[in-house]
Image (tube, rainbow, N blue to C red):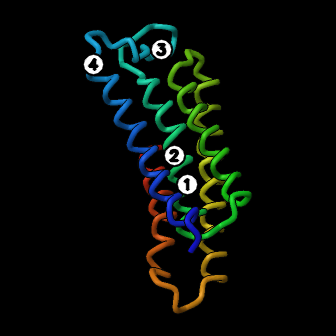
Amino acid sequence: PEIRSRCLPSLLLILMYMVHIGQHAVFTAGWTPWYANTFAQLGGVLDFRPVYTLTFVEWMVNVPLLLVLAGHCALGRPLNEVTKPVLLTNFYIVLSWAALLTTSEPLRWMLVAVTFAMYGIASIGMLQWVADYFQEASKERSNRTLRPCLSVGLIALFAAYG
């Protein structure tokens, strides 16, 4: 295999770890929780539950990297095929964050509904990666049945976070 295909997964993992370490360094270094917003309860009353905006920023960096690892590196899907689920996922991360910060109940429920719909569409795209992989991968390929587990596992993990 060419050097790019051998080094890309390691590079993506290093980037994810650096972002994750940076996030936790920010959480532990400060004396005040400047990185947390207050949750706006319905009716405009603040209930002082934190919304960790920095966590959403971390997800917007690391989740696309995970999806590229699963779709492009593990399953060999072209980047143009991986792009739609990546963009949908990042967009629904932003919408879920916005749903936590809004004081409008109808807007909150609309954002939650759109978020779950976008999760479903992105998940279908990821399952299509798996189907295409099984059609194209030779029966003798190493880890032929294990590689798709990364994509399916991410779908399940994102459902648990939802």
Element type where label 3 sits in the image = strand
Instruction: State the image quarter where residue 54 is shown.
Output: top left
Alpha-carbon span between mark 1 and mark 2 = 6 Å
Up-down relation of residue 25 to residue 160 (above or below):
above
Alpha-carbon span between mark 3 and mark 2 = 26 Å
Which of these two is toward me, 48 or 54?
A: 54
Q: Which of marks 3 and 1 is nearer the N terminus?
A: 3
Picture disc at residue 157: none
Could you tell me if the residues under marks 1 and 2 are in contact, i.e. CB atoms within 8 Å? yes
Residue hosting label 4:
29
Instruction: State the image quarter where residue 121 is shown.
Output: bottom right
Residue 112 percent location from the top left of the image: 58, 35
Up-down relation of residue 45 to residue 139 (above or below):
above
Q: Residue farthest to the bottom? A: 140
Identity, as a three-letter code, of the amino acid under mark 3: Ala
Residue at 55 percent of width and 54 percent of height: 67
Element type where label 4 sits in the image = helix
Identity, as a three-letter code, of the amino acid under mark 4: Ala
**Mark 4, residues whose alpha carbon is within 10 Å: few (<14), some, or many (≥20)?**
few
Alpha-carbon span between mark 4 and mark 3 = 26 Å
